[in-house]
Amino acid sequence: MGQTETALAHADLASRQLARAEHGPALESLATALRLAPGLDTLWSQFAELIRYFNLRHPVPAFVRELLAKALEHPAVDPGDLVRPITTLALSRSGVDAFGEPLLLRLLEDVVIRDGTLERQIVETRRALLERVFDPAPQPLALQTAIAHQCFNTEYVFEETADERERIARLRGAITAAAQVPPHWCAVYASYRSLLTLGNSDLAASSLVRRQVTEPLEEQRWHAEIPALAATDNSVSAAVQAQYEASPYPRWVRTQLSAAPGTLVEILRELFPLADLKGIVETPPRILVAGCGTGQHASTTARRFVGASVVALDLSLASLAYAKRKSRELGMHNIEYCQADILGLRNWDERFDLIECSGVLHHMEDPLEGWRILAQLLKPGGVMRLGLYSETGRQPVVRARELIAAEGFLPTPDGIRACRGAIRARTGDAMLAKIARSEDFYSMSGCRDLLFHVQEHRFTVPQIATMIARVGMRFLGFEFTDAGATLGRYQARYSQVSDLKNWHDFEQEFPDTFARMYQFWVGGGN
């Protein structure tokens, strides 16, 4: 047996150990696999999927630190999967603050950190750095830069005082008046405001200038080149479009690029082994991503399926420009971006093997009408992957919106900051505590999408069953991203994974099952 085969055997052992909740042994087995075959992208993806569940404490074994450092730079790894292990490691360092952990400083550049304790440390450290910005003593530029990246990633959602606003205004004046701007001035300013707001200030090239000036200007240039395919005069569509023009969502820096793409049939067979897949294409699929946002979904889909060609549509030109820039950055040339409202596609003559529409229909005035229009764009044997909000799973959001209505918070930066503070202050409210643990709670556009959306429908499993029947399709199954944990819990109670009545009963027993949304596949009717 060669090294690669031995490595894959260790990886398979790690999977079996994880299924038995033997997390430590699984990590050691996977580390062995990576030592034998560090060039296998699939092993790095498996490492990220395993390590994301770990709460690490300092000190960790050298091999764990080495793997985390390599994973931070690996294209097969979603850096979001590393937030929990690296954050818990950093916060466990006794006698020093979390920023003494170099892995954390690197992580801050590429993700949104979803941890209230660490956010408080960032806010306090940012404030202290601003107060000392004009001190003649050497400044911690690496720390300042990492915090500036994180604050930009969150779109400056962190609280700020009137004193900080006065100080940042003075700093802006100093920067615009200076013949040569000290790098740490830029880093501190960029922790509160985008460097793009400085106008024509002469700033030395840096990672912050690239992220906050060069890339946004590139997106503005793409606006003129993205074609408009279909528009409508629907007032709800117009309101949703305005929200995402102002707050493109989600903002992302890196995403996992699928290391092992498959055919449409292969992926469906892996997800739903007992489903009838007769008639589904084996050839490279033509795919529509309806409501692609900032392109993370489209990029993942374009890499997930062998030979795929993708058309990605969205209402928001700002979101599409972000998506276009990221696709070019990733070297992806099999995605075509167009501006369109789903309601304007009734007479479109394109047809697709797969249509993905996740997190979109529930923001339309009539979700069923949007679904019907998309279903008409399927080729014979085509399938759809849909995502809809759960009435049960979204109850924490309902509770937060009650608070927003009672307190009169507005969907402005100051209103969103005040809302976050009010949610955190209700320490005895379990529903609001769930909101404060949500990833979207930690960015401005995320909070607006989560709590202040201009249009939202929520559904139950029986309602979805009715809609599937009315569109004339058949349910294939739910898709989960938790390494089989939910499906295993379900199968311990029920044998039919495509039985929607059983899934409804299961959700009543486990209300958080679809806390993010129902993610499911449907095919043409029998």
Image: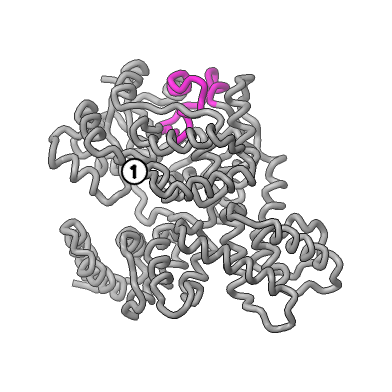
Figure check: 389 above or below 472: below
Depth order, front residue of 477/6: 477
Depth order, front residue of 92/75: 92
Q: Residue at x 37, y 72 (%)?
A: 67
Q: Quarter-wise, where is residue 191 in the image?
A: bottom right
- SS assignment at label 1: loop
- Is residue 84 rendered to the left or right of residue 491? right
Q: Residue at x 29, y 37 (%)?
A: 511
Depth order, front residue of 55/72: 55
- Is residue 523 rendered to the left or right of residue 170? left
Q: Quadrant of the N terminus?
A: bottom left
Extent of the magenta region: 342-371
Please name the residue that numbered disc 1 is placed on.
Answer: 263
Depth order, front residue of 77/422: 422
- Is residue 451 rendered to the left or right of residue 274? right
Figure check: 11 above or below 399: below
Give coordinates of residue 438: x percent, y percent. Answer: 43, 48
Q: Quarter-wise, where is residue 138 in the image?
A: bottom right
Give coordinates of residue 14: x percent, y percent. Answer: 21, 64
* Neighbours of disc 1 within 10 Å: few (<14), some (14-19), many (20+): some
Magenta region includes residue 191: no
Amino acid type of the residue tagged 1 in the rendering: Thr
Q: Residue at x 58, y 69 (%)?
A: 125
